[in-house]
Amino acid sequence: MSQTVPLSVPPQPGPWAVELVGIDKRFGPVHANKAVSLRIRAGSIHGLVGENGAGKSTLMSILYGFYQADEGQILVNGAEVRIREPKDAIALGIGMVHQHFMLVEEFTVLENLMLGAEGGALLKDGIRKARAEVERLEKAYRLDVPLDAKVADLNVGIQQRVEILKALYRGAQVLILDEPTAVLSPPEVQDLFRILDALRAQGRTILMITHKLKEIMAITDAVSVLRQGAVVASFHTQDTNEAALAEAMVGRRANPAVRRPGAPAGAPLLTVEDLSIFDERGVERLKRATFRVRAGEIVGVAGVAGNGQSELLEALSGMTPFQRGRVHVNGRDVTPESPMDPAQARRQGIAHVPEDRLRRAVVKPFPAFQNALLGYQDDPAMADGPRLNWKRVAAATARLMEDWDVRPRQPSLRTSLFSGGNQQKLVLGREMERDPNVLLVGQPTRGVDIGAIEFIHRRLLAMRDAGKAILLVSAELEEIMALSDRILVMCDGAITGELAAEDATEGLIGRLMAGITDDMEHGSRADAAGGAA
Amino acid sequence: MSASTNSDGLPRWATLALLPAINLGAALVVSSLVILAIGQDPLSALAFMVKGAVGSGTGLSYTLYYATSLIFTGLAVAIANHAGLFNIGGEGQAYVGGLGTGLVCLALSGWPWYTVLPVAVLAGALFGAVWGLIPGYLQAYRGSHIVITTIMFNFLASALMVYLLGGPLIEHGQMAPESREFAESTFLPAVKEIAAGLGYRTSTLPLNLSLLLALLCAAGVWFLIWHTRWGFQMRTVGANEAAARYAGINARTTIVVAMAISGALAGLVGINELQGVQHRITLNFQAGMGFTGIAVALMGRGHPVGIVLSSLLFGALYQGGAELSFEYNEISPRLVVVIQGVVILFSGALEHMFRPALVRLLKPKAAASAAGQRA
Ligand SMILES: Nc1ncnc2c1ncn2[C@@H]1O[C@H](COP(=O)(O)OP(=O)(O)OP(=O)(O)O)[C@@H](O)[C@H]1O
Ligand SMILES: [Mg+2]
């Protein structure tokens, strides 16, 4: 048994909180978990890394009772248990926070916390007790959340805390977090880690999936690497490093894409002047944005999430109307009086990878090949008259899956059954393979593994070199700095600065992200002639 | 619907065949208990029902005749459902559609049925489409909930027909709220004529040519939903409106068109009922077919093949139930409604009740076969 579990020397000697022994799981032909054995020390933070589709979420879903293993045992606090459904897991003190939150948006935080744990037929008593208990938990872990606010009004970082609080409220001693940082901005990640630290200090056990090795190094005590369903390595975090982890994950050394200064940028393909968006309350969410993207350049948009970047992408792709300004794209003028809808935008050669693509850029119950057509259903090459030629679509999808390494290569598998990262690759592939003139892309590498990040970066650079205009929104400063020829920084809906790649430093961008614009010796404020790089 | 297994690993054949069979079995068990409770022998009653529905040419003919109307309304509910709309207005759409068909048959006296039929079909579809399209429009552009508006349109249809049949359309000198009889030349050929043509003699039976029309519609709906661009767009709107918007699909027009098609399908009930059987516009000729269509669509899982099969089942229930209440004095027609209700309950509302158990039951086999593959 000890050789199946390489982790033989515990970080701090103590009992095992969770032991998975020989867990095996198949979905039809897909062997998602192959005899996985894993032991988690009580009171530790254990990281789980691996490529997209490696079986991380599946393994955690088995522990949480969403799936049943075909073979293998689960031990909690040394005793073998049967976990048939999440209810069993909760009773055993196991809680899970999914990557896509499972909150009722129309309910308040407190109502969400109580859901399924109402504590009696009369709501009033339950509410009083719940409030007291939740406030105690909040204090213990410095989890500030407004209990009476509606969930829909909270940002993702706070919603995630609600999820954590919900698990704790149900008595979770073991907390599973599936890619918790994918949707967070760097300061939010810091807050999350502070909370995780406090939980660990109180003796709770945490299992965290992530694609970001830096986070593994920063917070975990131990880490296991999954590859194609099997555990290929386990380390004490202090005995390993990012490069070794990356190698264990993909079986080769990491090889990040590097941007070489391309040919001088050509004519502007996308010109944005004075663009403003007001939300339904009349608040100006995007403030007079003005910039250009030329053929053959990548313009990165940096900023803390929620500072107008999403609105910018939405407006340019035709998803939301704008109320002031002008967009000129591929010879077409778009104004509030003559708006452009997403279908027209596509016809103008604009492709759009939205930030929350798993919600809006795919229809989850459809088979993958139908999603590979979504948005391009008017393509005459894919139809014979009124009849869609699904055979041809499926063949094209099979090629796309090959090129973009979408696994498993099953065009007719229901999209929701692909792992998160593989769904992302499908969307990116669909939008980039169409050879658009202008690519609007939000968080291109969110949720994908290291190998895929390198691949996507190479493809973006290749598109740039082929003379396309790319507008890249990303919460990863490193990604922005690695790919962009020019960088726009946004704060509070406004573009606070524009930097040439050579002039950009993290410190300078950070200051502009915070809205500090007086110290500008390296940058120039964007103006109508923006783009002179 | 297109994946070969579901997320819980239940194979497709079990979902499509085994589960419905189990549901139906459960419904029969509960129905038997009810029959037992009123002091009758459930086995002989159920056997009588089956015999009444399919045991004779006459019974079968009635079963198919009911099934015909149910195919139309079942398809109507299903297509709206694929667009994310719950159309409970099949009843009203069938009623008003029948008005269109009836008016054509009245107007084209003396024309042979085969020239009347296309016009009558068009008119029925058109009238039904309008009755579906208005709630669709109100939903898409005014945000009035389709469930509410279609219910209201059922009442409006009733009121309209009562007015028309009580006044403008009533046969001169008659008390019954019905139109005059259509000219005989316009009657759709029924089984009797078809059989006579083939050299058989039968009594007058309701089954008529419109069954073929219904099957044609089922094939058309199948093609429309899964093999056309528009069907793809409609399913996208129904499954994820944000994604539809992203894909450049106009959700509003899609909703209006889907409701129009839905109404048009329901509107064809009149071809079967009026041009086929009653040969005049009568009060409430659609008699609940629109509502039963909801159960039919549910049980048929929105797929035309499933809808045809569940229409046959419900047609048999109608016919067998009618026979049963004739034969057994103690079993009132209401009990037959109870039996139908129990079937709807188990096949529709409680569709997935036995699913987890079935998954567990089939699990060891799946694991064993996987192990066998490995060896
Ligand atoms: N319900 C299911 N039916 C069929 N296949 C499934 C199902 N759930 C997962 N899979 C497959 O199992 C494999 C492992 O998926 P899983 O979601 O565990 O990957 P992951 O490691 O979490 O990847 P990612 O980093 O992309 O989230 C994938 O190939 C996936 O397509
Ligand atoms: Mg995952």
Image: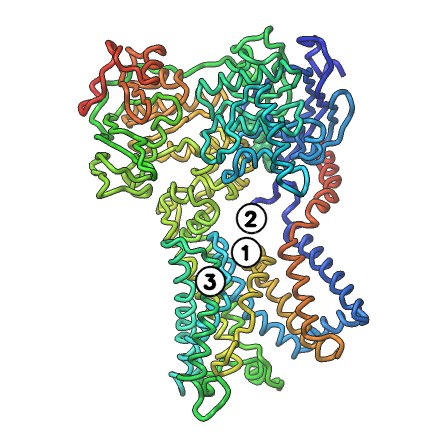
Figure quadrant of the N terminus of chain A:
top right
Q: Classify mark 3: helix, strand or loop.
A: helix
Mark earlier in primary sequence (2, 3): 2
Q: Is A156 located above or below residue A239 in the figure? A: below
Q: Is residue A395 among the parts visible in the rendering?
A: no
- Does B9 sit left or right of B72 as displayed? right
Q: Residues within 10 Å of mark 3 (few under 14, many from 20)?
A: many
Question: Mark 1 falls within which chain?
Answer: B
Do tags 1 and 3 sit on the same chain?
A: yes
**Tag 3: amino acid:** Thr
Do tags 2 and 1 sit on the same chain?
A: yes
Give the residue number, with chain letter if any, for mark 1. B302
**Tag 1: amino acid:** Gly
Asked whether disc 2 touches disc 1, contact meaning CB atoms under 8 Å apart, the reply is yes
Quadrant of the rendered image holding ligand 1: top right
Name the mark on residue B1. Answer: 2
Q: Which residue occupies 54% across, 77% down?
A: B208
- Give B119 or A162, whichever is nearer the viewer: A162
Q: Which residue occupies 50% across, 55% down?
A: B81
Q: Is residue B296 among the parts visible in the rendering?
A: yes
Give the residue number, with chain letter if any, for mark 3. B150
Mark earlier in primary sequence (1, 3): 3
Q: Where is residue A440 in the image (x, y as percent from the top left)?
A: 34, 30
Q: Where is residue A103 in the image (x, y as percent from the top left)?
A: 54, 36
- Does B109 sit left or right of B369 as displayed? left
Do tags 2 and 3 sit on the same chain?
A: yes
Q: Is B307 located above or below residue A488 in the figure? A: below
**Mark 2, mark 1: which one is toward the viewer?**
1
Q: Classify mark 1: helix, strand or loop.
A: loop
Q: Classify mark 2: helix, strand or loop.
A: loop
Where residue A334 sits, quadrant-wise, is top left
